Amino acid sequence: MSELYPFIAEHDLCLVPLEDTTFNDCKSALKFLECGIVSVPVLASPRRDYRELIRDDQSGFLAADNPDAWYAKLCALRDRPALLSAVSREAHRSVKAEHTIVSRGTQ
């Protein structure tokens, strides 16, 4: 675990492609939390937990379940580095404010 966060932080974006299956809809959005805490946004398939936690183009990115949507989103991010930077900051703020022991300890 001590190597995970520094490794994630070396990246600009984390890809979370998940097929539209019942199994994947039961997965948590752990990658959103792990990446957001070190200011790395995720581009994820619209599985249940990711839809609930990610505000598209604000705290992360969602791409529809087809290669063209993923390609379009990746091209948009390549062409808009300021958006990627802003979403990185918001991902960190969101995870820290809403998904840590300190922020949710009383719940």
Image: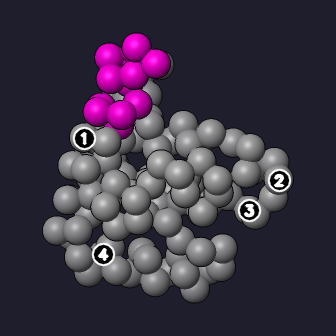
Q: Main secondary structure of the magenta part?
A: helix
What is the x, y in percent for residue 49?
59, 48
Residue 47 sits above or below residue 29 on the image? below
Q: Is disc 3 surrounded by few (<14), some (14 to 19) or many (20+) residues within 10 Å? A: some
Q: Which mark is residue 10?
A: none
Q: Mark 3 touching mark 2, by CB under 8 A?
A: no
- Chain part drawn in magenta: 95-107
- For label 2, the crowd category at 10 Å Cα-Cα, with few meaning under 14, some 14 to 19 and many 20 or more, is few
Residue 55: quarter of image:
bottom left
Cα distance between the residues tagged 2 and 4: 32 Å
- Asked if marks 1 and 3 touch (Cβ < 8 Å), the reply is no
- C-alpha span from label 1 to label 3: 28 Å
Position of residue 51 in the picture relative to residue 91 (left or right):
right
Q: CA distance from mark 4 to mark 3?
A: 24 Å
Q: Position of residue 82 (x, y in %)?
A: 16, 68
**Secondary-structure class at tag 3:** loop
Res 19 label: 3
Residue 11 percent across, percent down from the top left: 34, 49
Percent from the top left, x then y, of residue 7? 38, 35
> Would you say residue 2 is visible in this rendering?
no
Does 18 sit above or below residue 103? below
Q: Which residue is mark 4?
A: 78
In this rendering, the answer to whether 69 lies above or below 34 is below
Q: Is residue 35 magenta?
A: no
- Please indicate whether residue 60 sits to the left or right of residue 23 in the image: left
Task: Name the N-terminal-most of marks 1 and 3.
Answer: 3
Sequence-wise, the earlier of marks 2 and 4 is 2
The answer to which of marks 2 and 1 sits earlier in the sequence is: 2
Q: Outermost residue toward the right?
A: 22
Tag in front: 1 or 3? 1
